[in-house]
Amino acid sequence: MGTWTPIAMAGIIALSYLIGWVIRFNIAHAEPLLNTKAPPHLLKSMEFASNLAVFAAYLISVAFYLRVMSAFILRSVDMNTETNANILTSLVLVLICVAGLLRGLKTLELLEEYSVSIKLAIIGAACAGLMWFSLENGSSLPAVAETEFDLDSLRLLGGMLLMVQGFETSRYLGDEYDGPTRIRSMKYAQILAGAIYIGFVLLFMPLLGLVQDVPPEETAIIGMLEHVSFILPIMMIIAATFSQFSAAVADTLSGGGIVREESQGMAPARAGYAIITIGAIILIWQINIFEIVAYASRAFAFYYFTQCLVAIIAARRSDNKNGNSLRITGFTTLALILLWITIYAVPVE
């Protein structure tokens, strides 16, 4: 996006926060309706469609997370080719599936507790390094090329919606946490993540001129950080490995839970693990990383679209007549935006 990069990132963050508003509304208003003995048929059907959509989105996102992880690991040993990355990703997928089939994935999920702290510490160090580098060298770096922001730019941004996905996990933790806790956790997660995204992009702007003629690749951040400090690329590889692996495990767990829930216990969560593993392996060998990002973004956009429809149905049944017309208008507008992304988003290539 060139000179438009900070505004583009802020736009994605704003859209994701509005989508979070929809899902938080569903936690507060749709879930109580769905948990009654006789939930509204249309609402139940739409929630079923939504679960199918998010399962497909999780399958694609697991392929993306582990493919990126493999690229970072292999770059650290100068072996990052597409074939090598696909082989390593396939092996990791099989290992996660075997662990899930034999012992469940809860043990692997414990990594999340430690990886979050490690990731935030590394992000903080990278931001500090970027700030110091910009103050020292900002005036001597090549300027970022002027770019035109048009409809194609919006299509590219739609293809990056996956980047700000993850907050919807709170929607599916009802067995462990009450509604207000999940709503609060989602707000905090989105605000913190949004601040990190925008701050990181602003600090990176001086470096963009150094790589604007380089073809895009998933590990480009390593080459950029090499200009700042020799230690930051190593730290970023560690952060990416923890981040992508734990995210893949979390989405695999969620996918298994959806299979168990929608089959009413007839199919175990392990069946979901197997489906996700097979589907993800097929994906990584058939399409490149940027296409995977776009497919995942479109899948999540469609899932969020169905959540907007769930919110509209729940709002129409709400007793709060005064605020419902505005809410329904907002939900409908977001639904149309997300449907547009589902149809027209393109990969960054």
Image (cartoon, rainbow, N blue to C red):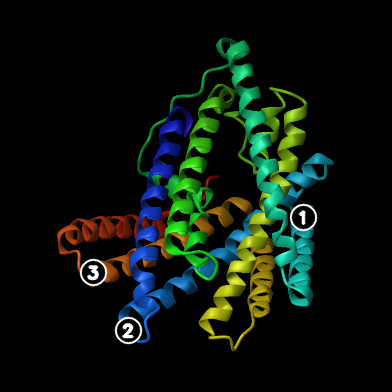
Q: Is residue 166 visible?
A: yes
Mark 1 against mark 3, which lies toward the viewer? 3
Report the Cα–Cα distance between label 1 and label 2: 48 Å
Question: Hey, which residue is sitting farthest left in the picture?
Answer: 322
Find numbered disc 1 in the image and state the secondary structure of the residue it sits on.
helix
Mark 1 = which residue?
83
State left or right for residue 304 relative to residue 202: left
Mark 2 = which residue?
41
Question: Which residue is at a point 42% across and 31% down the rendered structure image?
Answer: 4
- Which label belongs to residue 36? none
Image coordinates for residue 340, horizontal then vertical, percent: 35, 57
Image coordinates for residue 280, horizontal then vertical, percent: 65, 66
Image coordinates for residue 222, horizontal then vertical, percent: 70, 34
Find numbered disc 2 in the image and state the secondary structure of the residue it sits on.
helix
Report the Cα–Cα distance between label 1 and label 3: 53 Å
Mark 3 = which residue?
318
What type is the residue that disc 2 sits on? His
- Of 15 and 336, which appears nearest the observer? 15
Mark 1 against mark 2, which lies toward the viewer? 2
Report the Cα–Cα distance between label 2 and label 3: 16 Å
Image coordinates for residue 5, horizontal then vertical, percent: 46, 32
Q: Is residue 67 visible?
A: no
Find numbered disc 3 in the image and state the secondary structure of the residue it sits on.
loop
What type is the residue that disc 3 sits on? Ser
